[in-house]
Image: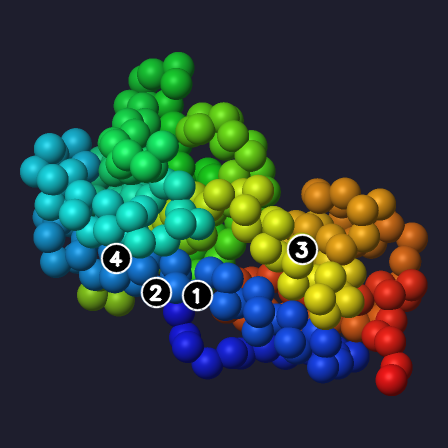
Amino acid sequence: MASAVNTTGEHSDRGLRRAARDIIALTEPLFDALEALAEACRRDVDLTLARPFDDVASWAALAPAAERVLVTHQLATGVGAAVIGEESMDGTASMAWWIRRDGHVSRKRHVTNPQSDSFYDVRHLRWFRVPMTTGRPALFGPYVDSWGTDDITLTAAIALVVDDRRVGVVAADLDTRRYLDLAEGVLRETEVSALLDDEDRVVVSSDPSIDTGSRIASLGHDVTGRETIDELNWSLARLDDQSPKRS
């Protein structure tokens, strides 16, 4: 993730720009760690295999880098990679994933057999599909990870690129409650109304009457300020009843 803040805003103001910088700062170290994990994947895993993570050696090769992310970054509760190998006949992805629970890191296995009723087909999940399509890093959620942890989840994801070709995604699940608390603190401090995802749904708001998941267009307020956070594919909004205070 770029170290320089890259935000654009229509009817932006100092509070929105400050909030954008602070929101980026919450996850910038984690995105940097995902870049390092992607490099470890390219270096240590045989990505020419049809299903690289059906191979135990691939898990072992990536484990040290994945565990380092979970030990170093307290926002991360799970991390790993999903890859569509060069020789994959059906285009399905193989997946390696690790989770941290009570201070211990362990492997989390997903069912990646298309014939199983519990098939975890990451190709149709937004955290996999969007980086594979756009090549851009992004945050996704909060959402219910029905086939993964069954928890309310936020996922940070970047494309895994080999020789200018996107072969998969490297991602991390976040401690959702902790992230939302931190983000809400940013909004309150800067008097910004809401943090929005790429579909203009509310991720978190400084207004307790605004629910997470609400579409901003349905709230009955005019948007008086907006700042786009290019690094996350998210944005910040100030609503008509929360204009910045004047000194």
Point out residue 64 in the picture as x, y percentages from the top left corner.
Answer: 16, 47
Instruction: Tell me if label 3 and label 2 are in contact, CB under 8 Å.
Output: no
Point out residue 241 in the picture as x, y percentages from the top left corner.
Answer: 91, 63
Instruction: Tell me if label 1 and label 2 are in contact, CB under 8 Å.
Output: yes
Task: Tell me how far mark 1 sits from mark 4, CA to CA.
Answer: 15 Å
Q: Is residue 182 visible?
A: yes
Label located before the other in sequence (1 or 3): 1
Q: Residue furthest left?
A: 57
Image quadrant of residue 238?
bottom right
Query: Eyeballing the image, is 192 above or below 53?
Result: below
Quarter of the image where the C terminus is located = bottom right
Label located before the other in sequence (1 or 4): 1
Dot 2 amino acid type: Asp
Dot 4 amino acid type: Ala
Q: Nearer the viewer, residue 24 or 54?
A: 24
Q: Is residue 237 visible?
A: no
Instruction: Tell me if label 2 and label 4 are in contact, CB under 8 Å.
Output: no
Give SS at disc 2: helix
Dot 1 amino acid type: Glu
Point out residue 27 in the picture as x, y percentages from the top left corner.
Answer: 47, 60
Task: Tell me how far mark 1 sits from mark 2, CA to CA.
Answer: 6 Å
Q: Which mark is residue 159?
A: none
Q: Which mark is residue 184?
A: 3
Label located before the other in sequence (3 or 2): 2
**Which residue matches tag 1?**
28
Residue located at (39% from left, 69% from top): 1
Dot 3 amino acid type: Glu
Give SS at disc 3: helix
Label located before the other in sequence (2 or 4): 2
Q: Which mark is residue 38?
A: 4
Image quadrant of residue 187?
bottom right
